Amino acid sequence: MIQELMKIKSNQLIAFETYELIVEGALVQQIQQPGQFVHMKIGEGNAHMLRRPFSIADYDYETNELVIIYKVIGDGTKWLSERHKGELLNVLGPIGNGFDIKTVEHQHILVVGGGVGVPPLYNLVKQLSSFNKVTAILGYQSKGAVFYETNFNRFAETYIATDDGTYGFKGLVTEAIDQLELPIDSYYSCGPLGMLRAVQHKLDKHHGYLSVEERMGCGVGACFACVCQADNDKGYVKICQDGPVFSSSEVTL
């Protein structure tokens, strides 16, 4: 993990209130797994004291480029959306434990994402698709919020679900799972806590991995702001330090 001033290569709107940010820096060389994240300083001066966690959507060791997809939901991310090519961002990372992919080969993998939980699944799907058949179910609020469908389709059979039915399946991603009746050997999921809980319950007979989203303070395990109940000796895990990815049998959501 290093702290670096990373240079913005592009920062563009790709869906409703959703931006794709590409930055460049040596930090990329330290990324070890899909599903890790970075902690970014937001704003000028002391306007925003705490760093913000952002999932790593994709990365390229050859170009040293890192892709972050984020949604504008407050003053901090609005400030980020107004940054331009050539500006520098103070980034700490990579942080956390990502998805285990080394032990998965020749399986039918189901990948389930919802909203801002979709980005960390993109590089995962790219890597899993080399040795497995991958199906992705991605959930969004509406047609205007859909992003990266074409990107996912390059590596996985991809289905879209929208809350209002304006595109793809109408309803929740768990309802789409029922309709598709897919053969599943294992699964990977990231999204809002309610979605993860529903996926964990529906697929309880399958081994899976859950990337848990949570508000964070320090991002390095010191402040206990992102604790989740777990089946271990302590009875809890720190999402930033022990996760954000956990075995589906390890955490109680």
Image (cartoon, rainbow, N blue to C red):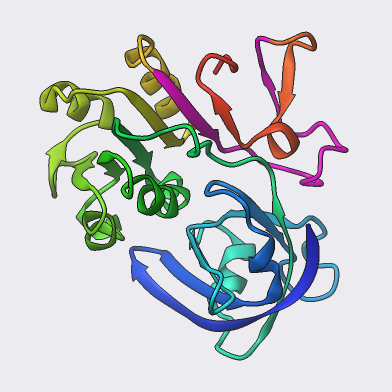
Question: How many tags in the picture?
Answer: 0
Bounds of the magenta span? 207-231
Q: Verify whether residue 214 appears in magenta.
A: yes
Q: Is residue 111 above or below residue 92?
A: above
Q: Verify whether residue 234 appears in magenta.
A: no
Residue at 61% x, 73% y is 79
Answer with the quarter of the image where residue 221 lies: top right
Residue 242 rendering spot, x and y as whole percentages:
71, 32
Name the side, left or right, on which 20 lies relative to 135. Answer: right
Residue at 26% x, 23% y is 184
> Which of 144 and 3 lies nearest the eye of the viewer?
3
> Which of 32 and 111 lies nearest the eye of the viewer?
32
Name the side, left or right, on which 109 lies relative to 175. Answer: right
Residue 133 rendering spot, x and y as whole percentages:
24, 39
Residue at 85% x, 68% y is 46
Residue 63 rendering spot, x and y as whole percentages:
54, 79
Q: Is residue 53 above or below residue 79?
A: above
> Which of 60 and 203 lies nearest the eye of the viewer?
60
Q: Is residue 21 above or below residue 234?
A: below
Screen quadrant of the N terminus:
bottom right
Magenta portion: prevailing SS class? loop
Screen quadrant of the C terminus:
top right
Residue at 20% x, 32% y is 171
Answer with the quarter of the image where residue 170 lies: top left
Residue 61 rendering spot, x and y as whole percentages:
56, 70
Which residue lies most toward the bottom here?
86
Q: Is residue 51 above or below residue 118?
A: below
